[in-house]
Each structure stands twice: as structure tokens, then as C-alpha cells.
Amino acid sequence: MAHSIASTDTFAKYLLLNAERFRSRPAMRFKDYGIWQSWTWEEQLDEVRALALGLQTIGVQRGDKIAVIGANRPRLYWSFAAAQSLGAIPVPIYADSVAEEMAYVLDHAEVKFAVVEDQEQVDKVLSVAERVPALTELIYDEPRGLKDYDHTHLHAYEGLRATGLKRFAEDADAGAAWLAEIAKGSGGDLSVILYTSGTTGRPKGVMLSNDNFVLSAVNGNGFDNLDENETTIAYLPLAWVGDHLFSYAQSYTAGYCVACPESPETINEDRREIAPTYFFAPPRVFETLLTSIMVRMEDAGRIKKAMFHYFLAHAGKVGERILNGEAVAPWDRLKYAVGNFMVYGPLKNRMGLSRMRVGYTAGEAIGPELFSFYRSLGLNLKQLYGQTEATVYITAQADGKIRPDTVGLPSPDVEIKIAESGEVLYRSPGVFVGYYKNDEATRETKTEDGWVHTGDAGFFDADGQLKIIDRAKDVGKLGSGALFAPKYIENTLKFFPDIKEAVAFGHGRDFCAAFINIDLTAVGNWAERNNIAYASYQELAGHPQVYETIATHVDEANRRLAREPLMAASQIRRFLVLHKELDADDGELTRTQKVRRSFIAERYGPLIEALYDGSKEKFIETEVTYEDGRKGIIRATVKIVDAKVYDAPSEMIREAAE
């Protein structure tokens, strides 16, 4: 079926184009019951059209808001395209949101329809339905457990799809009318509303247009030479702007294939089978990968372990230089090639990154050593800096200009300036339309001439590359007047595999102190190897030998901070290992796993004061939320430890003063 396409300013129009130019190329893959299934671009067009025609039969119209809730599944991605083809606006919601969080977004966005994955999501939506007066119809993908529900306003995805297929087959006008709806769409129309993670209050609905996403995706594809031959794996939350760009917008504009894993638990195995050429992960994922590798190597034989460390040390010396195309002695190149055969290649294969051509990390700063480790293996890992309000791209690292201590140069068509306060501002084709039903917040964030306040403090270095220090509101000063940038300190700590999370304190105080969360996988494996029994995270976190290990990491972090002119005064003088994991369900992290600093400061006030009043330990009771929604209390006496600080080298003190 040929389609006349005047322009490609919406994703529905790109779908029609791709069904012509990439007809039989794979568009999407999904592992179900252990078997990978594939859909070509032509088949994807058929699926989206069938759903769109089915959605029309239950009343979906132009301008309606449609919530999309669930894991990364082809049918939920097709729901985006089907809604947009009708001029409706998708509103993806984090699948792990509790009902209370979901109710706010559903009501605030005035959602009329919701497409959800399974019974769990149906139950959450139904439990808050009375608080969402606009919501009328609910569509589910997975039917298990829903047979006996009232289906008056509950629809099976498969049923709507079948209805759409029947309409298309029997009504010659249905397909033509759908194409006419697509033709009505324009670049200026709203493409999606994405709700921010809400680190400082209620989430805000970021309105992004088709132009925002199409232009950002096209620029991103051009920057990294991405085309229809790429494969990526979609595993990050549907409601996150990064996934919407990498797994949806860039796929539609370039024509590459998106693979959906079978479940969150099988992501690592599924990635090994897919071996994506284009891969994105926040630093936490790269930290976890490295931790699992190091944990496995502890169980390896002596010879294998020695070989592993020998070749990793060599990669650390020459790997990045080889990747950057720099001059390296023939003997070192030969030794690196042997290391690639013996260690680096199998390592990359184990991580599912053997075919990775371009990889990105963002969301949080990545530790320089961690970043360099992956690049030393020959992986083209880069950093980008972005925001939901920017449709991701603000800066990115161009090949050959990659450094671990910067986030790169302005992305294509992006302008950046630094305000007198040190805040980073940008202007670009990706700048959001505004916050939904919040003109005041829009005016506070976006100026009349299109500049957006990032809320981040940063500066350009001598090469014109941007360095981000921290969130502007979080950057403070110690009592001495020295700079205090908590995120920088936290990332220095999080480089160590045993440390999963850290929260630094010090603004207005005499010194810097920190809460530390252990990584249960890494520390639990260590405990098992050393025959240390423990019954809970709390018990392991408080173990004396665990404290000794964390103390050595804090000591090394202080040595590194002492070598940084601006950060030497922020060495950690006291720390504690928190008795529970920071958790989004307890409000301590956002749904994108960012620390909610002010909430933690309020919740753990007694522990913070104990860090500063000289206490050696502190008893605390903390309310927790279990997976089934029940509340409970954890009681613990938390030990507080003093750490050694180091003098900064004299030349660095002079440099900082200048």
C-alpha cells in the first residue's frame, strides 16, 4: 500500500515512510517465552493501524490524553504511535509508581484512556479511578487474572486490535480516513507529555511537540551516524525522556530496530543475545556491570585472575589512546590485541556489548575511573548532558574529543550560556512547549526569548567543553567558605563497587560528612566467600568488617578529593553506613533513582546531627514501605566513624587561589 508523504514532521508520517523504504527490515523484536519474535516496519505499520482503528471505536479523538503504563513491550510502543496518528497525546507513567503517585498524574493530565500492561497496573488504576473523573476506558495487554473483572469499560488490547483489523478489511474508507488523520498532524502538535520525577515536589507535565522530538532525534542520529542498521535494547522506563528518544524517536527517524527484553530480570541475558550496536545506560547500570564482573573474578582461579588483572592494567595504559586513534607503540598494540582476544573480547561479550558502536551514559555524573575502564576495553562510551525540557540533548561528546571530566560540546543546533550565578542556560529546537497547566513554572524556567534555566551549575573549560559541578540549588559552601558540591563527592564514593549510593552533607557546616548505602550484591557476595552469615541488609550494613571495608573506600575517596583544587576542603571527615537501602517507595529516591536530598535531610535529621555533634553511634527508628504496600518500622543503632583527611598538594592550593 503506497502512501504519499509530503513531509515527515510526525512519527506517524515516519511510520508510513519506513514501511516503504525499510519494508522488510526489522523494526521491533520482543523475547516472549524464551523466543525472540520480530516485526518488520511493514508489519509494525499494520499493528499500529489496527490499534488506532480499534481505539477509534471506543471514542479516542484528537486532543485526548492516553496514559501508557507498563514495561518495555512492543504493544505499548505501538500505543504511542497509534495515539499520535489520531492526534491524541500519550502520557507515559512510571510502571513502578504507587497508586497515589499514579492518581496525581492521571488526574492532572486529564487522562481519558489508559493502555496498561497487566493485572497489576489495571488494579492500580482501578483503585484510584474515583479520583480521576476524566478516565473512561482502560485497555490491557496481558489478560492473565482479568477474566472475572467487569469489562464494561475494560478492553483487551487483542480485542481492539481484532476490531481494527476487521474495520480495515471490511471498510474501504477506514484506512483512508486514518491516513487523513495522519495528514492533519503537524510538527507543532503535542507529541507527548512526560512527567518529571519530582525531586522537589509534585511532578510537572513537560509538553513536548513533534518538532521537539523529530528534530532532536534527527540531529542525534546525524551526530553519531546512526542509521537503519543499528539495534538497541529498550529497558529503561517508558515515562523517561531518554527512552522515548532512544527507543522511539530515533528509531522512527533512522529506521533502526528496537529490542524489548522478556522481563526486567532477564535484561542482562537478553542484551547478550541481542548485542546492541547503540546502547544507553545511566552510570548505575555501568557500575552494576563492573561490580558483577569483579565479584565473579574473585571466584576465578589464580592464573585466570592474574591474567585478567595484567591485561586490564595494560588496557588502562593504552586502551583509550588506541580507541581515540592516537599513536601507540607496535609492541603495546600487539599486547593489546592479545588482551582483546584473551580478556577484553570475552568481557565485552559477557556484558552484551560486543557489537556496541556508540554508547552513552547520562542522568548522573559517571566516575572518571569507571568511564575510562569501559573505554579502555575499546567501547566507544560517551557522555551527554540533557533534560526532559530539552528533549534530552544539551551537550554530547564528539568522537575524538572525549574526556571523563566533561559532558562535551553543545549538541547540534544547541546554544549554551553561563549566567553570572554560574547556572547553565540553553536554547535549542528541543526546548519544551511548556509545563502542562502550570504557566507560572513555565515562566520561571523558560525566558521569553527561549532560554531555559537548567538549575545546574557549570562552566566551560579551555577547550570549550562543559563541566557540570552540581545542581545549582545543591551547591553550597562549607563554614570556611570553601565550595561544597555534594554530587561530586557522592560520585567519588560511588566509584567503589561496594558502595551503591551516598549522600553528602556540609553546606554551612564545619566539615563534610556522608551517609553510605552498601551494594547488597557486591557485599553479599564478599560475605558469602568469607563465611559471614547475615539475616538482612540491616545486619550486613552494620557488620564491623563491612565498616572496615567502607572506611578504606572513604580513605581513598579523600585522597582523590585532596588532589582536586576545588574539592580538597570537602574531604569526608565522618561517615555512617545507613541501616536501610534508600528507596523510591519510601520517598528517598525519585523514580529515576535520583536522591531526594531535602527529603532525606528531613527524614534522617537525628543521624545528620549525630555526624556533627561527635556521637559515636545513634539509635533511630525508620518507617519503610514493603512491596505489598504495608508499612513497617526498622530500628537500628547506627555506628558513626571518623575518617582521615589529607593535605592538598601546595601547587594545587596555589592553583585554586588563582
Image (tube, rainbow, N blue to C red):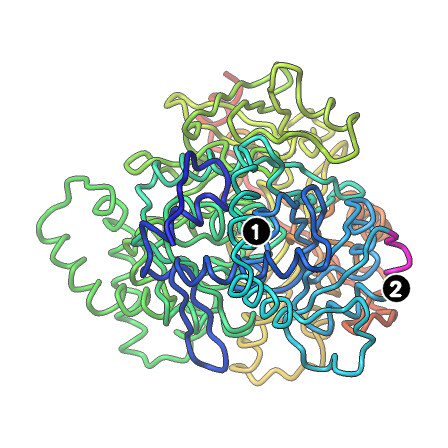
User: What amino acid does circle 1 point to?
Assistant: Leu
Q: At 43% from the left edge and 71% from the top edge, which residue is drawn?
A: 270
508 with respect to 531 (left or right):
right
The answer to whether mark 1 and mark 2 are in CB contact below 8 A is: no
- Residue 126's disc number: none
User: Residue 386, position in %: x, y?
Assistant: 53, 37
Q: Is residue 430 visible?
A: yes
Using a 10 Å C-alpha cutoff, classify the residue at mark 2 as few (fewer than 14 neighbours), some (14 to 19) or many (20 or more): few
Residue beneath disc 1 = 493
461 lies above or below 127: above
Residue found farthest to the right = 130
550 lies above or below 182: below
Q: Name the magenta segment's main secondary structure.
A: helix
Camera-side residue of 335 and 38: 38
- Residue 621's disc number: 2
Q: Quadrant of residue 205?
A: top right
Camera-side residue of 456 and 499: 456
Question: Which of the two labelled residues, at mark 1 and mark 2, occupies the earlier sequence position?
Answer: 1
User: Residue 471, position in %: x, y?
Assistant: 64, 34
Using a 10 Å C-alpha cutoff, classify the residue at mark 1 as few (fewer than 14 neighbours), some (14 to 19) or many (20 or more): many
Q: At 34% from the left edge and 37% from the top edge, which residue is drawn?
A: 222
User: What amino acid does circle 2 point to?
Assistant: Glu
Q: Quadrant of residue 40?
A: bottom left
Q: At 73% from the left edge and 47% from the top edge, which residue is drawn?
A: 596
SS at badge 2: strand
**Segment colored magenta:** 129-133
Q: At 61% from the left edge and 14% from the top edge, which residue is drawn?
A: 449
User: Residue 506, position in %: x, y?
Assistant: 72, 38
